[in-house]
Image: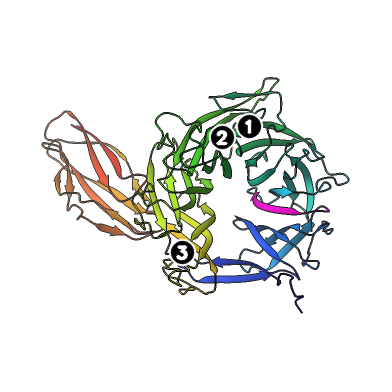
């Protein structure tokens, strides 16, 4: 029976969808309080990890040595079986006050999971036998935290735990882990200073952890855990000190972070109301386009292997937005270093390219946006709105390592003027908005991915004879690849290389499919030949692929 004035129980809802849209399983997990999902990370073949919060006094706990919730709101870590959604382990832990989870990151072996968030507890990280770096809060109202959980055994245990904060308000929003187990965290801070390791060098005109540039600043921090000892690698603020047009305070929030496997490149994303955020030349958008813009920044990190300092350098940084409010919520790197950024926007002139939805539909609300950015921050492969007449807000996104599929989750809200959401649906498990206020949403986007084999020929033939050559054109992507026309006949005027049959414009290749193109080499003289055949398509990453044609007449 629900007590008058108390919140009704709210369960965690986790679902797995097939690539074509239908749900494969749906799990509801919770107790007698409010239970909220905050982050997800899938390790293929190992399971789905879920971070969240609970106010339940009876949240189900399984295969965990962490069974002592301490306050009104505590942290939850789940591992679900990938194929069924069944709970493989469930841990609840916290301090004596309020602990709020944010996102998490699992290593590729699924033996370690990092979780960050914010806490008002003074006893969250102190546990007998658990290493820590900053054992006490920084003195402010709220601290960020970083906790590592060990999943290598039959029970879930803490590897290490630490506070991270200054004398004001600090919160962790996202974490990343590299192949060596080093941890990286991004968040927001009002503190004028943060704990800063003395042995790190900072390059390219951004502030180290010793000085906050504005009202709210983003921060990033790196940590190592070796020989049972947790240490700090770097800390830096990232923000401006002058308010943008229409803003009253220079506010900068860091919301997402990702790192490459070696830890040499990390990228962050968020939102800025500063007009003087440090940007670099040649980037997509060097200046703020409105009061609130999303931003993306890339850093290089040189880890010291001896007695010298670590070196953290800003490689590039760009604003990303239009005339309205644009808020970056998550960033992801694929294996080639391309950057996926997602968030929400109220700009009708948000940067759009090769879009699935090219027009802003939010009216006075917001649309989700998803964009794919080049590794140098100078250009876009594609960028799209996705939304309806209500407020559509992004919570997180992820992309496959090859960059061919992108998935986005968030919340679609009702438009009070029209009484509908208008959120666009395709191949939907639930095609109709369920009132009264808001629904979760998930949408997936796919790209074509061309593979040409081989890309170089070096052949010899007797003058007056013909050698056939075969080029295989495959689609390794998630959606149909469309080829440009290739005309039959000589590759170039007078060339001994010629195309047999050719390819018609808009020739499709389904995902996993392939076609072959035949060339002939017919030398007319005993000399060397050098030509190039261009194969064009709608692959955003490789719109034109050159096949080098080298030949010799004998």
**What is the CA distance from the residue labelled 3 to the residue labelled 2?**
31 Å
- Mark toward the start of the polypeptide (3 vs 2): 2
- Element at badge 1? loop
297 in the magenta segment: no
- Mark toward the start of the polypeptide (1 vs 2): 1
Characterize the local packing of mark 3: few (<14), some (14-19) or many (20 or more) Cα atoms within 10 angstroms.
many
- Residue at numbered disc 2: 239
Q: Quadrant of the N terminus?
A: bottom right
Name the image quarter holding residue 270: top right
Q: Are marks 3 and 2 in contact (CB under 8 Å)?
A: no
- Judged from this view, the residue extending furthest toward the top is 308
Name the image quarter holding residue 308: top right
The image shows residue 510 at horizontal and vertical percentages of 34, 61
Task: Name which residue lies at 79% across and 35% down.
Answer: 227
Q: Which residues are magenta?
A: 94-106
Task: Name which residue lies at 52% across and 46% down.
Answer: 331
Q: Are marks 1 and 2 in contact (CB under 8 Å)?
A: yes
Characterize the local packing of mark 2: few (<14), some (14-19) or many (20 or more) Cα atoms within 10 angstroms.
many
- Judged from this view, the residue extending furthest toward the bottom is 1
- Residue at numbered disc 1: 212
Task: Name which residue lies at 61% across and 39% down.
Answer: 216
- Residue at numbered disc 3: 390
Characterize the local packing of mark 1: few (<14), some (14-19) or many (20 or more) Cα atoms within 10 angstroms.
many
Instruction: Please tell me whether residue 510 is drawn above or below residue 261 in the rendered image.
Output: below
- Could you tell me if residue 48 is visible in this image? no
- Could you tell me if residue 90 is visible in this image? yes
Q: How many marks?
A: 3
Q: Which mark is residue 223?
A: none
Instruction: Please tell me whether residue 514 is drawn above or below residue 433 in the rendered image.
Output: above
Instruction: Please tell me whether residue 385 is drawn above or below residue 269 in the rendered image.
Output: below
- Mark toward the start of the polypeptide (3 vs 1): 1
């Amino acid at each position: 029976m629900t007590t008058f004035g108390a919140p009704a129980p709210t369960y965690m809802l986790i679902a797995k969808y097939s690539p074509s849209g239908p749900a494969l399983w749906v799990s509801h997990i919770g107790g007698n309080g409010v239970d909220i999902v905050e982050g997800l990370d899938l390790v293929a073949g190992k399971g789905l990890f879920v971070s969240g919060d609970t106010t339940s006094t009876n949240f189900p706990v399984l295969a965990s040595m962490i069974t002592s919730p301490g306050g009104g709101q505590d942290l939850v870590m789940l591992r679900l079986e990938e194929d069924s959604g069944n709970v493989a382990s469930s841990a609840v832990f916290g301090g004596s006050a309020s602990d709020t989870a944010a996102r998490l990151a699992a290593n590729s072996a699924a033996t370690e999971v990092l979780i960050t968030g914010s806490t008002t507890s003074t006893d969250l990280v102190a546990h007998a036998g658990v290493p820590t770096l900053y054992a006490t809060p920084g003195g402010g109202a709220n601290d960020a935290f970083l906790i590592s959980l060990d999943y290598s055994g039959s029970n879930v245990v803490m590897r290490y735990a630490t506070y991270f904060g200054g004398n004001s308000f600090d919160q962790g929003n996202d974490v990343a882990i590299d192949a060596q187990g080093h941890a990286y965290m991004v968040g927001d801070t009002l503190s004028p200073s943060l704990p800063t390791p003395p042995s790190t060098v900072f390059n390219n005109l951004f502030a180290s952890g010793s000085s906050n540039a504005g009202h709210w600043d983003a921060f990033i921090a790196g940590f190592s855990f070796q020989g049972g000892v947790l240490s700090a690698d770097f800390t830096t603020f990232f923000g401006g000190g002058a308010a943008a047009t229409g803003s009253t305070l220079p506010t900068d929030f860091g919301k997402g972070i990702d790192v490459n496997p070696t830890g040499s490149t990390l990228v962050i994303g968020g939102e800025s109301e500063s007009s003087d955020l440090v940007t670099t030349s040649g980037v997509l958008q060097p200046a703020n386009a409105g009061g609130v813009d999303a931003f993306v920044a890339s850093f290089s990190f040189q880890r010291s292997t001896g007695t010298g300092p670590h070196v953290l350098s800003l490689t590039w940084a760009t604003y990303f937005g239009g005339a309205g409010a644009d808020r970056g919520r998550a960033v992801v790197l694929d294996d080639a270093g391309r950057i996926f950024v997602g968030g929400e926007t109220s700009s009708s002139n948000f940067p759009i390219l090769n879009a699935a939805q090219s027009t802003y539909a939010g009216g006075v609300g917001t649309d989700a946006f998803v964009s794919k950015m080049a590794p140098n921050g100078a250009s876009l492969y594609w960028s799209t709105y996705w939304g309806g007449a209500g407020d559509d807000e992004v919570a997180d996104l992820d992309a496959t390592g090859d960059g061919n599929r992108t998935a986005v989750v968030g919340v679609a809200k009702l438009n009070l003027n029209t009484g509908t959401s208008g959120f666009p649906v395709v191949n939907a498990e639930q095609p109709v908005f369920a009132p009264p206020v808001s629904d979760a949403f998930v949408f997936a986007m796919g790209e074509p991915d061309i593979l040409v084999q081989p890309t170089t020929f070096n052949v010899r033939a007797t003058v007056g004879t013909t050698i056939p050559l075969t080029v295989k054109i495959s689609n390794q992507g998630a959606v149909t690849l469309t080829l440009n026309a290739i005309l039959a006949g000589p590759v170039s005027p007078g060339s001994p290389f010629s195309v047999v049959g050719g390819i018609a414009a808009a020739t499709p290749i389904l995902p996993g499919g392939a076609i072959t193109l035949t060339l002939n080499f017919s030398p007319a003289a005993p000399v060397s030949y050098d030509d190039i055949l261009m194969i064009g398509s709608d692959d955003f990453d490789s719109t034109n692929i050159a096949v080098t044609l080298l030949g010799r007449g004998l």
